[in-house]
């Protein structure tokens, strides 16, 4: 394979790049005035359909269909330019779980498909590049499901509004869970922070807050994805007498870590793990009895007491329908997928127009009780959604099910079980 | 000191697994002069195949399923080479590379369509069993199996190339295609056999990976990189070199991770790789003269 760039190709590339740069100045104005006599409202929806984040994106078409059915049954939403109700259509494009491709997909949706509104969610790798494109091309963007701090790191935003929990909330949640059994462990916490936006955002906050509560943090440093072996870290944890594990890892890395911890006789009393054990399939892949008692953040479940603003259906009804139609257990992203479109429909309804500035203003004024809870954006363009503590236990319907075991910060979400302590050996 | 025992043991055992992952790639690279970019994906394909067989044929367990998975993957490799790769063989380095790349994308997306993006693993109680020596030193069962299987695989391939007629024919075809053809060897067919064997070895490592860790439709490329590392350190096409390459990479990662911190674990392995490329570009055990 030849990697050298010929002079001709270099010039060609530079010409294209130059053209692209100069076109950027013109294009937004073209886009703005492009309301053609289209017979529908088009929402762009970059989605991690394939790649490592695919479990987040899996249910997108299923939820989209449900929501669109409800909205379009009544003929859609009144738009004054058209002088009548227009149905909503959604164009889903695959980001391949890659931030660069997510940005490309977003710019194509804006420039080529001439969407009216962007709705995007599922981790900073999907949300941040898309929000950046929306800023550049002045496209209203509703984003969800990426920790607020990681999202803010791409800001400030004028055209994007976001909803999810903050890094502050997750640290309060995990430390709160440790404190529940504060007299039964030695307050020594081993942390697992990968070298990614989440790992970097969580580590200083946890270090500060845990220290304030008298915890000793054992941190061996940030590590890259796809560690094939955690023996060095496990050895250090054993030596330092670690009794609590805390981290936010990608699922395959946590599976390697947790299996090796068992192989090497390391048995902490508690484990609060972000990201890696959100999905029942990842939990099941741990194998054996390994998932029993693991604690995780829960951002949405069938036990959340919230209802759809569209048809009053409950969180539980949505989950039951998913399980009935797909034979799969509920997953957190279901609710956020639904809520994203609720916010979009509500804003479109109040704006009554596809004019971008008016639509953006309507999104900013959102005050809506959605299926993931109340959404009202603050001055920094985000709205916090509630966070509670979940614990994996052997289930009745599925092999592993998550109970809500800690709700100190959001008592409106009821506990479904008491926390098991300590982890079984 | 005790904790170094654990690291050195784990490094060696992991190295055996790495060697099993790399041996098929090294063989095709060194002997057929073909870079199979789909090597990792074919491995994962075998993991899924094994999973399906275990779920649907109740009388099979993880280890007996190998008896079915390996021949099926052999056939996949054989047919793949015979009907697809051989068509572009001899057109230079790039066309087979691109075909393999396309194949990699097709396998990943095909697996995702059928099995969804959910995480899977081949469940075995061995995955968390271990033998306790001291509090700081345990011998993990599954890694011992990985290591022994890797060694067995490499010894088998070494003997195969050294003593069997087919092994000679494969080496002859790769050394000098024209002369081999004059001697009555159907080189195209020979390449198909070589690919079949390479993919069988990938199938074995796919099952080991599935039992040791978890896998997704897109896990393949992660192991392709390891296979490349092993191949380059050990020397392209050398069976013993692959084993040595695996051990060097495994140990470098674990000791590097301990000495410089876990952030440098993966990096340490690749620094060794770069250093070797600088002083011995043909790899540790490749015959120097043959690096063409």
Image (spheres, grey):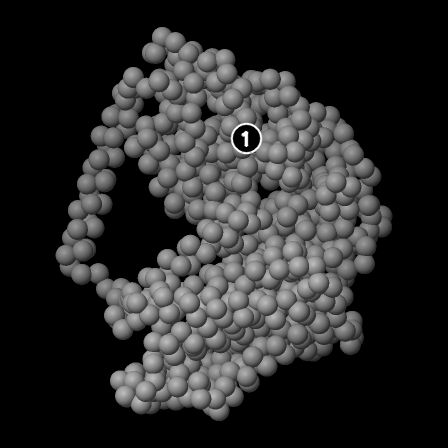
Quarter of the view holding residue A189: bottom right
The numbered mark 1 sits on a residue in which chain? A
Quarter of the image where the C terminus of chain B is located: bottom left
Position in image of residue B93 (x %, y %): 29, 70
Write the residue at 77% across / 73% down: B131
Write the residue at 47% across / 66% down: B76
Write the residue at 67% across / 75% down: B144
Position in image of residue B122 (x %, y %): 64, 60
Residue at numbered disc 1:
A63
The reply to whether residue A91 is visible in this rendering is: yes
Write the residue at 57% across / 60% down: B49
Position in image of residue A298 (x %, y %): 67, 38
Does A174 appear above or below B149?
Answer: above
Does B26 appear above or below A287?
Answer: below
How many numbered marks appear? Answer: 1
Q: Label 1 crowding class (10 Å Cα cut-off): few <14, some 14-19, many 20+?
A: many
Extreme-right residue of the structure: A183
* A340 sits left or right of B180 in the view: right
Position in image of residue B75 (x %, y %): 48, 68
Q: Nearer the viewer, residue B129 or A206?
A: B129
The reply to whether residue B25 is visible in this rendering is: no
Extreme-top residue of the structure: A83
Quarter of the image where the N terminus of chain B is located: bottom right
Q: Nearer the viewer, residue B84 or A232?
A: B84
* B88 sits left or right of A48 in the view: left
Q: Secondary structure at mark 1?
A: helix
Extreme-front residue of the structure: B184
Q: Nearer the viewer, residue A424 or B20?
A: B20
Does B164 appear above or below A68?
Answer: below
């Amino acid at each position: 394979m030849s990697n050298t760039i010929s002079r001709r190709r270099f010039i060609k590339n530079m010409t294209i790049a130059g053209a692209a740069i100069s076109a950027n100045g013109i294009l937004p104005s073209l886009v703005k005035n492009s309301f053609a006599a289209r017979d529908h409202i088009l929402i762009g929806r970059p989605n991690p359909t394939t790649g490592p984040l695919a479990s987040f994106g899996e249910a997108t078409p299923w939820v989209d269909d449900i929501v669109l059915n409800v909205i379009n049954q009544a003929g859609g939403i009144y738009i004054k330019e058209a002088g009548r109700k227009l149905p909503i259509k959604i164009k889903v494009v695959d980001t391949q779980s890659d931030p660069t491709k997510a940005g490309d997909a977003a710019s194509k949706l804006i420039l080529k498909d001439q969407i009216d509104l962007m709705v995007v969610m599922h981790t900073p790798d999907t949300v941040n590049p898309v929000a950046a494109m929306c800023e550049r091309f002045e496209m209203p963007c509703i984003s969800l499901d990426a920790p607020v701090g990681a999202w803010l790191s791409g800001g400030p935003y004028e055209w994007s509004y976001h909803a999810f929990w903050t890094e502050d909330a997750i640290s309060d949640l995990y430390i709160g869970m440790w404190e529940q059994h504060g007299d039964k462990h030695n307050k020594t916490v081993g942390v697992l922070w990968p070298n990614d936006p989440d790992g970097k955002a969580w580590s200083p906050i946890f270090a500060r807050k845990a220290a304030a509560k008298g915890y000793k943090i054992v941190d061996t440093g940030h590590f890259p994805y796809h560690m094939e072996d955690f023996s060095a870290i496990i050895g250090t944890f054993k030596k330092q007498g670690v009794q609590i594990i805390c981290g936010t890892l990608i699922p395959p890395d946590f599976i390697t870590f947790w299996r090796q911890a068992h192989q090497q006789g390391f048995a902490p009393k508690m484990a609060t793990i972000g990201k890696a054990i959100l999905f029942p399939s990842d939990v099941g892949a741990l194998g054996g009895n390994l998932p029993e008692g693991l604690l995780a953040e829960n951002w949405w479940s069938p036990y959340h007491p919230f209802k759809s603003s569209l048809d009053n259906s409950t969180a539980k009804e949505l989950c039951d329908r998913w399980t009935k139609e797909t034979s799969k257990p509920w997953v957190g992203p279901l609710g956020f997928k639904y809520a994203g479109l609720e916010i979009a429909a509500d804003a479109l309804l109040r704006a009554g127009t596809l004019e971008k500035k008016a639509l953006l203003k309507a999104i900013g004024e959102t005050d809506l009780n959605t299926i993931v809870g109340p959404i009202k954006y603050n001055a920094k363009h985000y709205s916090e959604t509630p966070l509670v503590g979940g614990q994996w236990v052997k289930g009745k319907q599925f092999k592993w099910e998550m109970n809500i075991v800690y709700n100190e910060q959001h008592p409106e979400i009821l506990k479904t079980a008491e926390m098991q302590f300590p982890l079984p050996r | 000191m005790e904790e170094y025992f654990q690291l050195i043991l784990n490094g060696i055992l992991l190295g055996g697994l790495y060697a099993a992952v790399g041996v098929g790639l090294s063989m095709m690279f060194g002997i057929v002069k073909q870079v199979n970019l789909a090597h990792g994906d074919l491995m994962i394909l075998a993991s899924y195949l094994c999973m399906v067989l275990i779920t649907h044929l109740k009388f099979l367990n993880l280890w007996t399923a190998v008896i079915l998975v390996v021949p099926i993957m052999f056939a996949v490799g054989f047919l793949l080479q015979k009907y697809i790769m051989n068509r572009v063989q001899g057109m230079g380095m790039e066309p087979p590379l691109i075909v393999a790349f396309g194949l990699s994308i097709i396998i990943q997306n095909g697996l995702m369509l059928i099995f969804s993006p959910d995480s899977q693993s081949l469940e075995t109680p061995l995955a968390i069993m271990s033998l306790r020596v001291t509090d700081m030193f345990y011998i993990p069962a599954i890694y011992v199996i990985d290591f022994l299987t890797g060694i067995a695989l490499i010894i088998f391939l070494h003997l195969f190339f050294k003593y069997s007629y087919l092994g000679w024919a494969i080496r002859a075809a790769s050394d000098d295609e024209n002369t081999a053809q004059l001697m009555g060897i159907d080189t195209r067919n020979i390449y198909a056999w070589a690919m079949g064997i390479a993919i069988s070895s990938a199938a074995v490592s796919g099952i080991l990976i599935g039992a040791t860790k978890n896998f997704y439709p897109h896990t393949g490329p992660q192991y392709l990189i390891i296979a490349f590392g092993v191949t380059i350190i050990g020397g392209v096409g050398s069976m013993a070199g692959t084993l040595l390459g695996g051990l060097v990479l495994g140990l470098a990662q674990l000791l590097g991770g301990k000495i410089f911190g876990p952030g440098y674990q993966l990096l340490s392995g690749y620094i060794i790789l770069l250093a070797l490329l600088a002083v011995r570009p043909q790899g540790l055990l490749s015959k120097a003269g043959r690096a063409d």
